[in-house]
Image (cartoon, rainbow, N blue to C red):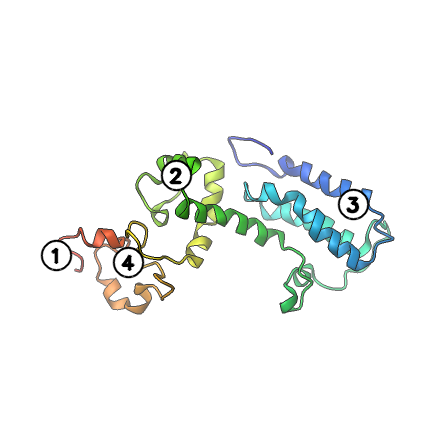
Amino acid sequence: MPVSYTTLRNSDWEFIVCKYLKRFEAWVGNAASMGGRHTLLDSVVTQLSLYHMSMWLMNKTFIEKLDKHRRRFFWQGCNKKKRYYLVKWSRICRSKEKGGLGIKDLRKQNISLMVKWWWKLETQSGMWQDIVRARYLRNRTVADVGPRFSDSPCWKALLKVKEIYMAGRKINIESGNIARVWSDPINGLLPFKDQYPQLFDICNIPGCTIKQVFAVETGSFFR
């Protein structure tokens, strides 16, 4: 795993490409059927980058490079003679229910693994959660956190996928410290700002949590 105080470059991830190529060379790709290569791609090759994708948000250029090697192996194995690619790779990576072959989409997998850290930060407790909350949240909710110049590369990467997490996030009301009155889909319902847009427009505290509502002075919540 590369360690850096700056954003990682494509060259820092070349060791993953080397892992891919080493695996491909070890297999007799010409002898394997297309179904066999499909199985090898999903069960072995894609897993080689799984851990690294759970820690860093890789850029599109590098993921396209990985897909280039995966495509080549899928369509022509280890045969150096070029063959036609009969179907777009994006269609092959669709689920079987949607007409694809179910091969993992690396970009979506990378984002999903990164989004999971936000879920763990909000729903679980532990040493790393305490450190992150003290360093970055500072008594704020996840929804209120924004980028700062001093943020670490890892935290900046997490912030890039935060909106994806927020879009699919559902809140169950407990203490009210996390749930935002207007923006969160509480108990699976539409956010109040979508149900009552006119009230939202005249609210003085659009980002307030449920707990904060009860601390607001009477008459100051709306304009």
N-term-proximal mark, 3 vs 4: 3
Q: Which residue is mark 2?
A: 148
Q: How many callouts does the rendering have?
A: 4
N-term-proximal mark, 2 vs 3: 3
N-term-proximal mark, 4 vs 2: 2
Q: Position of residue 162 (x, y in %)?
A: 44, 50
In the rendered structure, the answer to whether residue 162 lies left or right of residue 2 reads left
N-term-proximal mark, 1 vs 3: 3
Q: Secondary structure at mark 4?
A: loop
In the rendered structure, the answer to whether residue 93 lies left or right of residue 210 reads right
* Amino acid type assigned to the residue bearing label 2 in the image: Arg
User: In the image, what residue occupies the spot 36% across and 66% down?
Assistant: 189
Image quarter in which the C terminus is found: bottom left
Nearer the observer: mark 2 or 1; the answer is: 1
**Disc 3 versus disc 4: distance between alpha carbons?**
53 Å
Q: Which mark is residue 154?
A: none
Q: Secondary structure at mark 2?
A: loop
Q: Secondary structure at mark 1?
A: loop
- Front position in the image: 70 or 83: 70
Q: Which residue is mark 4?
A: 181
* Amino acid type assigned to the residue bearing label 3 in the image: Phe
Q: Which mark is residue 24?
A: 3
* Residue 215 shows in this picture: yes
* Residue 68 shows in this picture: no
User: In the image, what residue occupies the spot 66% across and 68% down?
Assistant: 99
N-term-proximal mark, 2 vs 1: 2
User: In the image, what residue occupies the spot 80% across and 60% down?
Assistant: 84
**Disc 4 versus disc 2: distance between alpha carbons?**
26 Å
